[in-house]
Image (spheres, grey):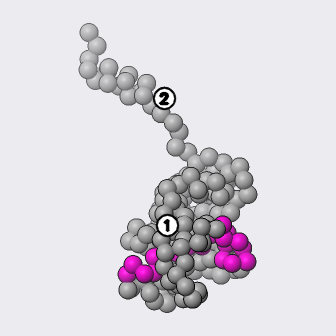
């Protein structure tokens, strides 16, 4: 009679063969975000690259907040920054975000856990065009905590986001 440990090993091995792979799939559309540096899950030679469809497959969050750049509250939709980083298996302490317009900012990786920061791909239910801060916008839920309504967090928000390097 086979030992229980042997049977359990066979069951686990069999189950593992039937589980879907959770590897980051290659982008099939235009790449709009690349994450490099300390990332364990890459789908290109040096980075985790995302097209819009890949970002839309992640759980979506929506919030409405005032920003210092607009006169009315804006509704933002996109995945949580923490979920995007998790998809790339990012580890480190600093996110160096870079925008299409060459703006760069440093964001503590802890912000992604501490706040519900999103990588917005929609503003007021519309895809964000490049000319109005798109295609992606790292945005904090400024109205949820008084500490977020400060220059520190406004400067960490990056519109026209194109890449992040994890250090």
Q: Position of residue 70 (x, y in %)?
A: 58, 86
Mark 2 or mark 1: whose residue is earlier in sequence: 2
Q: Is residue 83 visible?
A: yes
Q: Is disc 1 placed on a helix, strand or loop? A: strand
Q: Position of residue 167 (x, y in %)?
A: 53, 69
Q: Is disc 2 placed on a helix, strand or loop? A: helix
Q: Are marks 2 and 1 in contact (CB under 8 Å)?
A: no
Which label belongs to residue 149? none
Left or right side of 80 for 163:
right
> Which residue shows up at 43% across the image and 24% down it?
14
Q: Find out whether residue 144 is within the magenta segment.
A: yes
Q: Is residue 149 above or below residue 29?
A: below
Residue denoted by label 2: 18
Q: Find out whether residue 47 is within the magenta segment.
A: no
> Which residue shows up at 48% across the image and 63% down it?
61
Quadrant holding the N terminus: top left
> Which residue shows up at 40% across the image and 67% down it?
113
Single out the residue that lies furthest toward the top: 1
> Which residue shows up at 65% across the image and 81% down it?
103
Toward the viewer: 99 or 80? 80
Q: Is residue 96 above or below residue 5?
A: below
Magenta region: 127-145
Q: Position of residue 67 (x, y in %)?
A: 53, 84
Q: Is residue 73 above or below residue 46?
A: below
For label 2, count other residues whose C-alpha is less than 10 Å away and answer few (under 14), some (14-19) or many (20+).
Answer: few
For label 1, count other residues whose C-alpha is less than 10 Å away and answer few (under 14), some (14-19) or many (20+).
Answer: some
Toward the viewer: 45 or 56? 56
Q: Position of residue 4 (x, y in %)?
A: 26, 20
Residue denoted by label 1: 62
Q: Is residue 93 visible?
A: no
């Amino acid at each position: 009679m086979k030992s229980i440990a042997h049977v359990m090993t066979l069951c686990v091995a069999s189950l593992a063969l039937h589980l879907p792979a959770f590897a980051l799939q290659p982008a099939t559309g235009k790449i709009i975000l690349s994450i490099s540096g300390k990332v364990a899950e890459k789908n290109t030679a040096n980075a985790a690259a995302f097209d819009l469809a890949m970002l839309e497959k992640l759980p979506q969050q929506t919030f409405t907040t005032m920003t210092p750049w607009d006169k009315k509250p804006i509704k933002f939709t996109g995945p949580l920054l923490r979920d995007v980083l998790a998809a790339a298996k990012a580890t480190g302490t600093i996110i160096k975000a870079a925008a299409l317009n060459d703006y760069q900012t440093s964001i503590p990786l802890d912000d992604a856990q501490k706040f519900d920061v999103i990588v917005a791909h929609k503003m007021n239910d519309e895809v964000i065009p490049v000319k109005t801060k798109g295609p992606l916008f790292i945005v904090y839920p400024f109205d949820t905590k008084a500490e977020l309504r400060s220059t520190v967090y406004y400067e960490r928000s990056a519109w026209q986001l194109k890449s992040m390097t994890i250090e």
